[in-house]
Image (tube, rainbow, N blue to C red):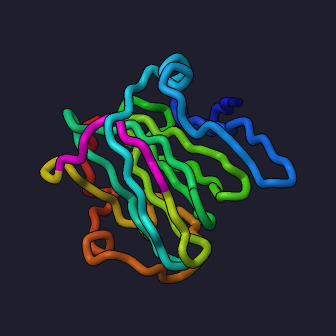
Amino acid sequence: MQIKKTPLEGLLIIQPHVYQDDRGYFMETYKHKQWYAALGVDFVQDNESLSKKDTLRGLHFQNPPFAQDKLVRVVRGSILDVAIDLRKDSPTYGQHYKLVLSATNALQFFIPKGFAHGFLSKEDNTVVSYKCSQYYHADSEDSLRWNDKTLAIDWGIPQPLLSEKDAVANFFATFNSPF
């Protein structure tokens, strides 16, 4: 696998080796020994979502001590994936990084603790799979508003499909980061 750094410290883009031939392809999406050596993270939970086109999920995170590192990949379809730095002492606090993950490009996105995460499905029946380093803890769950003007994320559409919870998430200006 190849690991590429992003401008936001700790966010990584991972390109696994994909072996293709006339039958299709094969790739290792996760091997504990290799991943632990590269990231120093143990993953304990896998999650998966199926989304219609233009569904936005996020911008989610869990507060400490239940904060999660995430390793995100797309099994089918494609997404615009976004991470926002919530670490108060970081020089990139409040900045975001985005990229397209797809079943075709096979990229994976490592999002460490201290970041909010969200994605917009770009195709119907998009399947996203992600590993988490901490178990889901409902009382620690939090989120930021997808269209917050302070964050200035260009999602490329005026109004995505949202959950009720995501539609009323916190604004960054009133957010007090626990990271």
Q: Residue at x 63, y 39 (%)?
A: 13
Magenta includes 130?
yes
Residue 46 included in the magenta stretch of the image: no
In the displayed structure, would residue 15 be above or below residue 55? above
Query: Residue at 42% across / 63% down in the picture?
Result: 49
Q: Nearer the viewer, residue 159 or 27?
A: 27
Q: Which residues are magenta?
A: 129-137
Say if residue 17 shows up in the picture.
yes
Residue 87, can we see it? no
Q: Return the residue nearer the eye: 158 or 68.
A: 68
Residue reaching furthest top?
A: 37
**Residue 73 relative to residue 85: left or right:** right
Question: What residue sits 73% from the left and 36% below the top?
Answer: 17
Residue 120 placement (x, y as % from top left): 52, 68
Q: Position of residue 55 (x, y in %)?
A: 47, 75
Determine which quarter of the picture holds residue 80: bottom right
Residue 113 drawn at (x, y percent):
37, 35
Quadrant of the frame with the C terminus: top left
